[in-house]
Amino acid sequence: MVEGMPGRPCTLVAYHVVHTDPDDELPLRLLTLDRSLTALVAEHRPDSVAVERVFSQHNVRTVMGTAQASGVAVLAGARAGLPVQTYTPSEVKAAVTGSGQADKAQMTAMVTRLLRLSAPPRPADAADALALAICHVWRGGTRSKLATAADRARRRGGGR
């Protein structure tokens, strides 16, 4: 979780890594994720939620697991009445490093620098999540304003 405005440095609020036992059955793992995310949303009360969009990978099993977990994150935001935005990994990389092809080390280094942290966030997944949050602050604000303007235009046009 970060705070900030488009075009300005973000500030770290908190980060948490939810762990599930890989030996547990899928429903239990997803339930653990759901309960943890619901508690975090209630504790931190964010304005919105950003989730990595799963698009394609070579390992279908990994894609399925990631997509199911992403769905739980989207649901946690929607259940709390929050706007939820998704971003592809290349969108996040481009927003944070300037290159959609940045590697994990570059991403971690930029997250550490942008949030003015004394050490890189650990584990590496935490840096990925913080990069997603930074991308959302910087790009989500613009998307949200465009969506609001388009919605207003539709309402005006539909009411005549």
Image: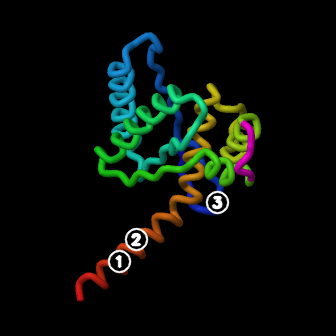
- Which SS class for mark 2? helix
Q: Which colour scheme is used?
A: rainbow
What amino acid type is highlighted by mark number 1?
Arg
Query: Is 134 above or below relative to 72?
Result: below
What amino acid type is highlighted by mark number 2?
Thr
Q: In which quarter of the image is residue 156?
A: bottom left
Task: Write down the residue under mark 2.
Answer: 148
- Which SS class for mark 1? helix
The residue sitting at 55% across, 47% down in the picture is 133
Foreground residue among 22 and 55: 55
Q: Which mark is residue 68?
A: none
- Which SS class for mark 3? loop
The question of residue 102 being in magenta is answered with yes
The residue sitting at 47% across, 21% down in the picture is 19
Percent coordinates x, y for residue 101 in the rendering: 73, 46
Quarter of the image with the C terminus is bottom left
Task: Write down the residue under mark 1.
Answer: 152
The question of residue 108 being in magenta is answered with no
* Count of numbered badges drawn on the protein: 3
Q: Earlier in the sequence, mark 3 or mark 2?
A: 3
Percent coordinates x, y for residue 39 in the rendering: 35, 33
Label pair 2/1, CB-CB below 8 angstroms: yes
Task: Write down the residue under mark 3.
Answer: 8
Query: Is 17 above or below relative to 50?
Result: above
Percent coordinates x, y for residue 113 in the rendering: 73, 44
What amino acid type is highlighted by mark number 3?
Arg
Query: Is 15 above or below relative to 89?
Result: above
Query: Is 92 above or below relative to 56?
Result: below
Foreground residue among 108 and 100: 100
Segment colored magenta: 99-103
